[in-house]
Structure formats: structure tokens, C-alpha cells
Image (spheres, coloured by chain):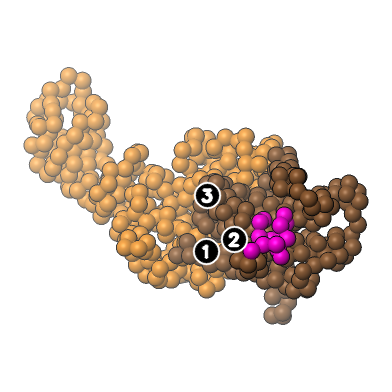
Chain colours: A brown, B orange
Amino acid sequence: MAQCTRKSALLEELEAAWAIAKKDIKIYYLKAPTLMFAILFPFAMFFAFAVGREMPVATLVPGLVSITVFFSASSIGPSALPLERRIKAYDRLVCAPISPYTVMLGKVLSGAIFGLVIGSIILAACLPVFGLQIISLPGLLLGLILASFCFSMLGIMLAMFPRENPGDVMLLLNFIRLPLIFISGIFIKIEMLPYWGQVASAFSPLTYANDLMRLALEGASAFDPLLSAALLISFSAAFLYIGRRIDLKFRE
Amino acid sequence: MVQMPSAVELSGLTKRYGEIVAVDHISFEVKEGEIFGFLGPNGAGKTTTISMLTGLVTPTEGTAKIFGHDIRKEAKEAKRCVGIVWEESNVYPELSALENLNFAGEIYHVVKRQREAKALELLEKFGLSERKDDKVGGFSKGMKRRIAISMALINSPRLLFLDEPTAGLDVQSNIVIREAVREENRKGTTVFLTTHNIEEANQMCHRIAIINHGKIIAIDRPENLRRTIKSAQSVQVSFEEGAETGEAELGKIPSVRRVIKEGHRFRLFTEDPPAALEGIWDYARSHGIRILEINTLGPTLEDVFINLTGTAQAGAGGRS
């Protein structure tokens, strides 16, 4: 009986997380400007750093997919949450009979789905254009799914600071996101970085997401794919925990 | 007499922000089935108390229980019993009326068939059926508030928190909302009402607590609270046109403490209304003045509020 109660409680939490995700997708993600930003911004970044360099464009595609997932999964949640705080709609979620982790999970889920879909669209467009093939499907799926969740979690973690102005959270987020692009092997291979850069790259989840993308599209990776997957899961769990601590700190 | 169980029970509930004590060891209980008013001037600690009870803010000290569930140790069980209407109508403007209600039902774990039926029933009740598929962003303030109340009722709560439910609304919305709240109460829902509108509290509440500087300074039935300040009792009198009298003359009547002129009437404050009445009749007879109208007035709840908090509140006070 107790087990039955626990199961139904878990199901209730998952249903509530899905309800929050559905609501967020409808309100914030399925908007023309959001979709345009999510697709165009990574392309702009890609061409800004790829054009004029001697690297073959095709070898940069894993990086393009990685930063697409990185930016699309992590951008909208941190913009939307302060707005919900401003109109006190976030209070509605906090006061509902659901776990605070469920609220965060719902927010993360919508960002992750968005990152996954936009990343897949970019990948699907790049494969025929650059004549690429998927060499490792498990690597691709693992990379896309885990990276989407991890990057979405990063954004929601920072959105836990009780700010009502989206710009405040985005400033903090970009302060973290932009340096990560340059130390995670997207445009510059990790082995070409200075020593301190190589050390710093080990602490970037984008490094492992990009490595899984390289495995999927180039058949080569610097790390064991299972290690990359485990580290992406660990980063996600750490972001979730830190996000909750931030939230608790400001409720005291 | 059957003792009603407690819907809300606070014991030494305290909230400190650094050196500032927003709520200072407050203890009281709200009985099941009551409409309980929670009054206080701005910054008295009303919102902080509600925020603690609803889980928005963590108490620094003390305990609070909702239907026996500790708000910290059994937060989910406590929250499950509750519906909340905030001062700002925190609806999702990009969603339709029906979508807002359905979403509220989903996060309160109301099963699909039940929440769909309840959502339609509530929209009908609040006169919004025809607008159910319209985005709430285009609704008036009163309509948004009705949606917010409907969202709070979607889980058929045993306890309804209302924070300034009628503030800034038109008369029609006020009437609809007050009647809906009374109806919910008749069906057994306990109501915890925070309001600045003292007359609203006077009309609706079974009991009222007044908080000031984070402390509960009075808690009783409205009529009992009014009885606590005898000095605010008064006699209101108007004389025939052309009668030569004034505040100074009337102030000489025995037992009258103070006189104020209110339009063409005089209000004579006294601790002994029968003696004052007698004095006024004697005064009128001896001066050959005809009395057109005479009423005794009890202290209003606003008088009580001002007396206890030292704060002059805007808005009309009630009369008895």
C-alpha cells in the first residue's frame, strides 16, 4: 500500500512537471521570434568564427550542433522565469502541492525539448549540405539528449536568483556561457589551447557535449563516451542542487 | 456545543529579515468553516504571514499548521488543502481562460475529467463561459480577478486564502466575488481574508485579527471588537432648518465629550448614549428647536482599527 502511494506520488510529480513544461512551451517557446533566434544565432556565431579559417567546414558541424543546443536550451527559461516572477505567476508554482524540484524539472524539460528539437533541425539541415553521415547513433542521441537537459538546467539554475528583470539573469548567464564556447573545443581544438585552457575545458559541460557530437559525426572523440555521458549527468545534478540551494537561500 | 477543528493554527510564528522583525511570535487559530479577516496597516506583517502560511517564505521561528499538517514538515499535504488568490491576479495572459484553469488543476493534481468539468462550472459561475477560449491578456481587471479566484477553487480547497480580493475592482465584480466567497463558505470552505477594506471585513468575517508592527493586537468577532471602545459611541442628530445651534452649544450637554458637524447633522460622541439622548431632547425643548432625525451610532470597525493601530484608514467605516 505504501509503495502504491509512493508510486502515485511520483506520477503526480511527473504529471505536474509535464504540465509546467507544456505551459512554458506554449507561452514562451512556440513564438516566431524565439524560433528565429534559436536557429539564426548559432549560425551567426558559426560563420563569425568559421569563415576565413583553414579548417574544413564539415569538421565544424559537431560544434555548430553543440552550440545550437547550448544556446537554445539555456536561453528561454532564464528569460521567462523572471517575467513570471514579476507577474507573481511563479508564486503560483511555488505554492502548489508539488516538490520545488518538480517546478525546476518542468522548467528544465521545456528548455531541453526546445534544445533537442532545434539541435535536430540544424543537424538535419547540415547532413545533406556538407555530405555528412551519422557514424554513431547512440553517441548522437546521448549527446543531444544529455546536453539539452544539462544546458537547460544551467539556465534554470541561474534563474533561481530572485530577479524580476530577465536582463539581470541573462547577463549572468552570458558571463558564463560565452567563455565556455572558447574553451570547449568548438572553434579551437582543446589540444591547441594553452595549458590553463585545457584545464578549464575539463570543467565545461560543453566540452563533453561537443565530444559526443564529434563521436557521432566524425567517429572520433577525446573522451570515453560513457565518461562524457556520466559527466553531463553529474553537471545536471549539480546544477539542480545548486539551483535549489539558491532558491532556498532567498526564501529564508 | 461542538468544538470545530482548526483550519489554521499558528504558534509563535516569527519572521526576521536581519534585524527587522516582520512578524513577531504570533499565535492564533482559525476554525474550520470560518471567514477570518486579517487586518493591519501597510507593513504590519500581513503579507509576510500569508507568505509563510502558503510556503513562499520560510518562517524564522514557530510553527503553523493547516488542517493539522505542519507547513514545513508536511508542506505538500498542507498545500493540497489550500486555494490562494493573490492581490495581483497572477494569471497567464497568453493562455485562454479555460487553459489557465486547466493548468491550475494539473499542478493541484485534479484528475482530468474532474478538472475539465470543474473548470467549465467555475467559468459559468463567474459569468465567463462565453470567453472561455479567449486569451486572458485581453480581459478587464475584474475578469482577471474572477479567473484568479476560479483557479484557486479548481481543486475544491478546504481553505481559501484571499489577499485583497476586491481591491481596485468595479462594483459589479466586487458583488460577484463577495457572493462567490460567501457561497464557498456556506459549502464549508474556510476563508482567510486579508483586506484593507474594513467594511468588507465587517460584512463578511465571523472573526477578525488585527496585526500591527508584526504583533496581533486584537482578535475577536467584529461586534465584540466594536464594543471594546465605548468612547467611539455617538448620537447623530439633525435639527429643523434655521435652528440656531452649533458645536459649542451642543458640547455643553452633560455626558457629551465631543461634537463634530457632518453636513447638516451633528455627531455627539459619548460613553453614555441614553444620557446624551435625554440631554439632546432637553436641549431641543428648552431652545424651542424641532429635531428632524436622531440616531445612535455604535463605534465602527474603522474606529476600532484606528484606535488600536493609531492609523487613519481610507474608506468608509460601517455602522450599527
What span is colored magenta in the figure? A181-194
**Residue situated in front as seen by the camera: B283 or A16:** A16
Tell me the number on the disc at residue B127: none
Position in image of residue A236 (x %, y %): 66, 66
Tell me if residue A205 is in the magenta stretch: no
**Residue situated in front as seen by the camera: B305 or B228:** B305
Do the dots labelled 2 and 1 sit on one chain?
yes
* Circle 3 crowding by C-alpha within 10 Å: few under 14, some 14–19, many from 20: some
Tell me the number on the disc at residue A246: 1
In primary-sequence order, the first of circles 3 and 2 is 2
> Identity of the amino acid at label 2?
Met
| Residue at x 49% of width, y 35% of height | B171
Image quadrant where one finds the N terminus of chain B: bottom left
The answer to whether residue B271 is seen in the rendering is yes
Q: Is residue B159 above or below residue B12?
A: above
In this rendering, the count of numbered labels is: 3
Separation of marks 2 and 1 at Cα, in angstroms: 8 Å
